[in-house]
Amino acid sequence: MSDNLKELKNSYPDFNFENLAKIANVEVKLTAQLGKTKVPLRDILRYEKGTVVMLDNKEEEPVDIFVDSVLVARGAVVALDNCYGVKITEIIENIK
């Protein structure tokens, strides 16, 4: 049993964690956000192939990881087997 699960069980002794098995295979949308920016629509209308859109994150800054629009972690972009991935560097505590 992972330390996180043990901590959860200790924090919520009345919760029936066996019920988690019933939903463990439910798929959720996970999104890694590299950054964002605000751009006037007139600029977007001028975009063409090769246009570079500058984002607010710097290269060394972590990316935000969302599960169904809820920020749950941060990480670093990695490249593996011709695909991009995210290495988790921080788990967000006190998710609301």
Image (cartoon, helix red, strand yellow):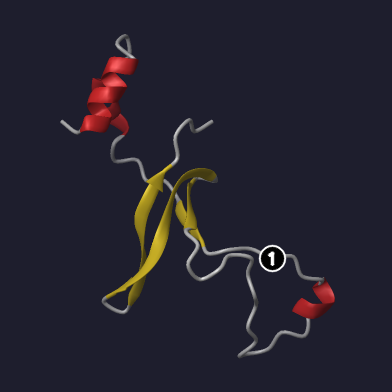
Q: Is residue 5 visible?
A: yes
Residue 5 horizontal side relative to residue 88, left or right = left
| Mark 1, secondary structure of its residue | loop
Q: Nearer the viewer, residue 74 or 60?
A: 60
Query: Residue at image x 40%, y 62%?
Result: 76
Residue 9 horizontal side relative to residue 56, left or right = left
Query: Residue at image x 63%, y 83%?
Result: 52
Q: Residue furthest front?
A: 60
Return the x and y of residue 35 as percentages of the image width and height: 58, 63
Q: Which residue is denoted by mark 1 in the rendering? A: 37
Q: Residue furthest left?
A: 1
Return the x and y of residue 71 as percentages of the image width and height: 51, 44
Does residue 88 lie above or below 25 as drawn?
below
Q: Residues within 10 Å of mark 1 (few under 14, many from 20)?
A: few
Residue 4 horizontal side relative to residue 56, left or right = left
Q: Tell me the amino acid under the disc marked 1.
A: Thr
Does residue 71 lie above or below 82 as drawn?
above
Return the x and y of residue 12 as percentages of the image width and height: 34, 15
Q: Residue furthest top?
A: 14
Query: Residue at image x 84%, y 77%?
Result: 42
Return the x and y of residue 8 as percentages of the image width and height: 31, 23
Q: Nearer the viewer, residue 6 or 50?
A: 6
